Amino acid sequence: MSNPATPTALGVLDERPPLTFPPGFLWGAATAAYQVEGAVAEGGRGPSIWDTFSHTPGRVREGHTGDVACDHYHRLGEDVALMAELGLKSYRFSVAWPRVQPGGAGPANPAGLDFYRRLVDELLAHGIEPWLTLYHWDLPQPLEDAGGWPARDTAGRFADYTALVADALGDRVRYWTTLNEPWCSAFLGYGSGAHAPGRSDGADAVRAGHHLMLGHGLAVQALRAARPEAQVGVTVNLYPVTPATDTPGDRDAARRIDALANRFFLDPLLRGAYPADLLADLRQVTDFGHVRDGDLAVIASPLDLVGVNYYSRHVVAAPVEGVAPEPYWRSPSCWPGSEDVRFVTRGVPVTDMNWEIDAPGLVETLRRVHEEYTDLPIYVTENGSAFVDEVVDGRVDDADRLAYFDAHLRAAHEAITAGVPLRGYFAWSLMDNFEWAWGYTKRFGMIYVDYESQARIPKSSARWYAEVIRRNGLAAE
């Protein structure tokens, strides 16, 4: 179903000029294991925190779980054939840690690794570059029972798991991402409790964020030892953060949220230190005693690339005495130490997630990473939108999603023109899937999935994206 406000806000497509991307630009699409695979009790897979969370009443919309999801585990061949039809140059997928190490420790589960061997081989047979993400939120439940990411030992376990995957797949996989969106794992999983494992403790969230990054650094070292030729990076979800007004209070609110959303991760990963203002903001939450000598050097282990996931902008305002802020990602707050900052809506078009559509924010974000942090190659590893889709006469006309992609790809091209070393773009998502705490109530896919029959229907945006890939750019529509 189309939202008529969206195309107007994004611009009229037939007034836009054609654009060509640099030779070799990597066009892809992305998914995550728990969101698409299903088969949660097959092939020796153990439970993850998302299995536990989704089976806990009240945690996920309508009681949905990832037990079946898109049944990708059994439909691997069909799904890769669809990727080939779209002309994808790369497919970004995640490995389910509990499929490889059901208990989170010990030797690898051969059947679990065999599934990913089949996937990688099928991708390569179709000329599609595998892009492997080691952690997309599905921590083995036994590790959560032992303390989860707030426990330092989990970082070491992650490095051990990484070595197992590198040994099995490193001869055929060139691109590796350690973590996907550690902010979500830490602050939604352990801060607000809106995501698995559903814990709500600000100090735990901060510790989890640090140990996620420590695990990343140890995983980078494990990958370098096993596969020196691998191209290794990390994916962070970033937001431009804008004060609602130019008042000192609103500017300080923007500084605080930027520190938690962006610089909490960018600074340790790419500068080897936490920002001083962040440490001051969190003084009442934690003394950072969990940070040991040498940790930050490990976290800042040299990378080959940086992945950026971009969806929207944060507009924030100073607290108002006696007025509780609207909860962001449900309450308790996922902003420890800054719980009273207000998130402001501007009345602009939004997606079905109620996220404001802000393509210029992608330019702002990419330029910031390059100009303030690194000369490394950058990839947009996720960008996409949820809208309400309907099947009419066997077709899904998702004009809003198409317009969203068009606007954001034009923003990506603008960033390249401004000197950003952007090397690729992965649309989120290849197909509709289990959208975490929203269950199956939100659709991000370029391919429509009928969850009852598991039929796949490429939407208008999929056909459009296939033409973008064929042209290596955007035509004047």
Image (spheres, helix red, strand yellow):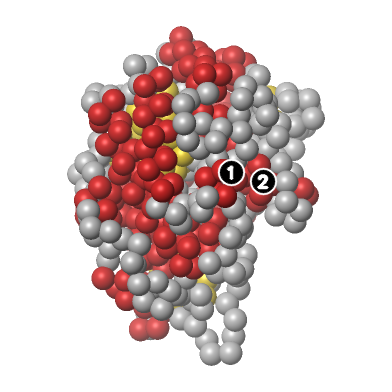
Is 270 situated left or right of 238 in this image? left
Q: How many marks on residues?
A: 2
Relative to 188, say whether 143 is above or below.
above
Find the residue positioned furthest to the bottom: 321
213 left or right, relative to 433 = left
**Which mark lies nearer to you, 1 or 2?**
1
Q: Is residue 359 above or below residue 202?
A: above
Name the spot of residue 426 as percent of width and height, x first. Answer: 44, 35
Point 31% across, 61% down: residue:
291
Residue 88 or residue 408, whichever sits in front: 88
**Residue 331 appears in the rendering:** yes
The type of residue carrying mark 2 is: Thr
Q: Is residue 7 at all visible to an observer of this figure? A: no
Q: Identify the residue at image location x=30%, y=33%.
A: 222
**Corner quadrant of residue 263:** bottom left
Q: Quadrant of residue 432?
A: top right
Horizontal arrangement in the rendering, residue 65 relative to residue 108 (left or right):
right
User: What is the x, y in percent for residue 457?
Assistant: 68, 25
**Picture disc at residue 141:** 1
State yes or no: discs 1 and 2 in contact (Cβ < 8 Å): yes
Q: Closest to the observer: 161 or 403?
A: 161
Residue 366 sits above or below residue 323 on the image: above
Q: Earlier in the sequence, mark 1 or mark 2?
A: 2
The residue under the point 62% across, 44% down is 50
Q: Amino acid at mark 1?
A: Gln
**Percent position (x, y) of residue 62?**
78, 49
Residue at x 25%, y 39% (from the top left corner): 303
Quadrant where the N terminus lies?
Answer: top right
Which residue corresponds to mark 2?
A: 52
Q: Residues within 10 Å of mark 1 (few under 14, many from 20)?
A: many
Q: Secondary structure at mark 1?
A: helix
